[in-house]
Image: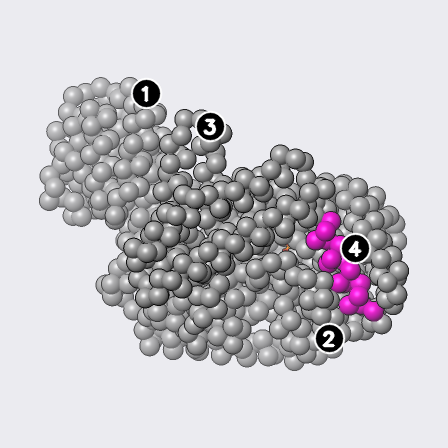
Amino acid sequence: MLITLRRIVQEVQTASNLDEALAIMVRRVKEVLLADACAVYLLEEESRQYVLMAADGLNPSLIGQVRLDRSEGLVGWVGECQELINLKNAAVHPRGRSPPETGAAGYHAFLGVPLIDYRQTLGVLVAWRRAEGLFDPEEAAFIVTLAARLAKVIHDAAAMKKVTRLLDGEAPGSAFIQGIQGAPGVAIGTIALLDPLADLASIPDRPVRDGAAEEAAFKAAVATVQEELRASGERLAADLPSEARALFDVYVMLLGSHSLMADTLERIRAGNSAPGAWRDTIAEHARAFERMEDPYLRARVEDIRDIGRRVLIPLQAEVKASRQYPERCILVGEAVGITEIVAVPGDRLAGVVSQHGSALSHAAVLARALGIPAVVGLAALPIGRLAGREAMVDGDQGRVYLHPSPAVVAAYQLRASETDALSARLEALCAGPAETPDGVRVPLQVNAGLIAELAPALAHGGEGIGLFRTEFAFMARETFPAEDEQYLFYRTVLESFAPKPVTLRTLDVGGDKILPYYPMEEDNPCLGCRGIRFTLDHPEIFLIQLRAMLRADAGLHNLQVLFPMIGRVDEVDESLGLLTRAYRELVAEGQAVAKPRVGAMIEVPSAVYLATALAKRVDFLSVGTNDLTQYLLAVDRNNAAVTTPYDSLHPAVLHAVRHVIEEAHRQGKPVGVCGELAGDPAGALLLLGMGADALSMNLTSLARVKWTIRRFTTHQARALLEEALALEDGFAIHRLLDGALEEAGLGRLVLTR
Ligand code: PEP
Ligand code: MG
């Protein structure tokens, strides 16, 4: 059964459109179940009726014609109760009105199963036999498994059909593609796709005029990578076990191997470009390794691919440098990352659309920080067909319009001006400090990661930088930045805010923050070599950063150093040890450096329970509610499928944050909050009730949070907190806070869901 199941799923997945996929499905199910007829009904969004979409064994002219109300007949029943129904004789069942509605006259045995994706019934799959009798349990189990596997495929194919109609001009002018809100605002512009050269498999063929130049470029790229590998191997020689060191030698050897070189040169001489020729050579060798019997040799296929990607970086550097972006660029891709966003010149980037990801992906966090509207998590996107098209990105409602009609644009312009007016009113109300009516001040700071964010953060009254994500500057590059380069960068950041505090977080890569020049292939990157684990594994990289930070602070004294992803006390101890070492080195070199204030991030559940021990070791704690929510609730912050369970107002998250604040205060240490919860008026209100000492947020959240703080007394905030903590589920907490904020007059702009 398993093999049959796999084959059917594969066949359906390779179908070029929804109709073909459904036709394959009914034909194959009918065969496997030895049924006399099989059909799929899909629930139509607009009419809320089941429409017969594909059938085998029924009159084909009924396809597209038969429509059943949601609660009509056996099909409606299966959809309603969302479970399998197996009937010996449908004709005698009170809901068994088969003919003529279903077109299944003369059939008796009935097996129906719902197609459910993310709790939503998409349709019903049905099989009939003429003879009376139940389908056997194995057949029932088979159809349940198949339906569960295919529901997602059908959902995506249906979404793709909708988008294709839109692209072909067959949909109404107001039609849009629905995704998830990534960053607020509306933008109209021209679509540019992610760099198509980033992935070896997607390198296009390009005929060449100057074969000799192409050969030279290829040889130079290989030499560069060999040199890099040799240098890395030597640099790490002392820290790496011998097997790991040997890997560097294997790579250098593989790269220089006659067959890889000769095959590629031959392809270039035959007329292809160096990247195209390299793509084919790598593909051929990868196939050869994949076919090998020996598991060790078979596993080397990943090394071959890795080498392929590495050589591609220098090879495409020139092409990348000459890349042009449209004036109002809507950047679109399967998985848009921080690196790609940062690569677009700031004055050209108008919007971002990423098929994968969620509102908490770092690309969305960055888009919010930059004030760039973004939509993420779209079920289907024929990316290849989108380049150069006009599009409108509605980050407020998570919609993407292709060639929006003038009426749609006009409606949006009206809404945008209303929103601007409301924001202006909020800003005007907030000219004063963030102080509660009973006189408690809560410093509101800004989260940033780019130089361009600093001036607006200051202009809008940011009382410091509560979180500077230094990793962003590490991403849009081709090597780790040198110490002097980092020094100049941090100096600019610190100077622009001095004497206000600036919290520079040490490199936090891993998870969805990937360095193009240091790919980490991990099965579960969010639980892998992330944040402080990475920097402690690489003291040579960590020390350069710490030295650059200390040097940048000379004479300013507004630096605070923050360690990310702390989960154990020894990680803080070791990090502090390296910071002291960097300090001593600089003092010995005669530099006028000072010891900065140091903080630990609380974003891993173990750190919550170590709050006391951690608070004893550092000057302050900073709660990262984005990752804390992810790890505490076991919900991936990047997965669009789990945006509902991902909730920072979940009672478990709130109890954890309160615990941290109480424990740190017992040790006399302040606690800031720098996750997205701090920028949400509902979250800010609860954090005020908990006694958080500072809130750090995206610039765009500053005005509404300040408004909230100025509107509620600490007594009211504490009372709301107690009420919220007495509730057992997040939805009730959302309702409670939405009510309180609406009553206070903040209205629809701050509804928490
Ligand atoms: C957090 O996890 O809450 C946080 C602020 O860090 P980042 O979003 O960069 O992971
Ligand atoms: Mg984090």
Residue 5 visible, this angle: yes
Residue visible at 85% across and 72% down in the picture = 555
Q: Which residue is mark 2?
A: 496
Per the image, is 543 magenta?
A: yes
Per the image, is 127 magenta?
A: no
- Looking at the rendered structure, the kind of residue marked 1 is Glu
- Looking at the rendered structure, the kind of residue marked 4 is Gly
- Chain-order first, disc 1 or disc 2: 1
* 719 on left or right of 391: right
Secondary-structure class at tag 1:
helix
- Chain-order first, disc 4 or disc 3: 3
- Looking at the rendered structure, the kind of residue marked 2 is Ser
Marks 2/3: CA–CA distance: 56 Å
- Chain-order first, disc 2 or disc 4: 2
Nearest-to-viewer mark from 4 and 3: 3
Residue visible at 49% across and 71% down in the picture = 349
The numbered disc on residue 599 is 4
- Residue 725, above or below 427: above
Locate the C terminus and report the quarter of the image it occupies.
bottom right
Q: Which residues are magenta?
A: 539-554
The numbered disc on residue 230 is none
- Chain-order first, disc 2 or disc 3: 3
Secondary-structure class at tag 4:
strand
- Residue 171, above or below 641: below
Residue 712 visible, this angle: no
Nearest-to-viewer mark from 1 and 4: 4
* 336 on left or right of 403: right
Q: Which residue is mark 3?
A: 295
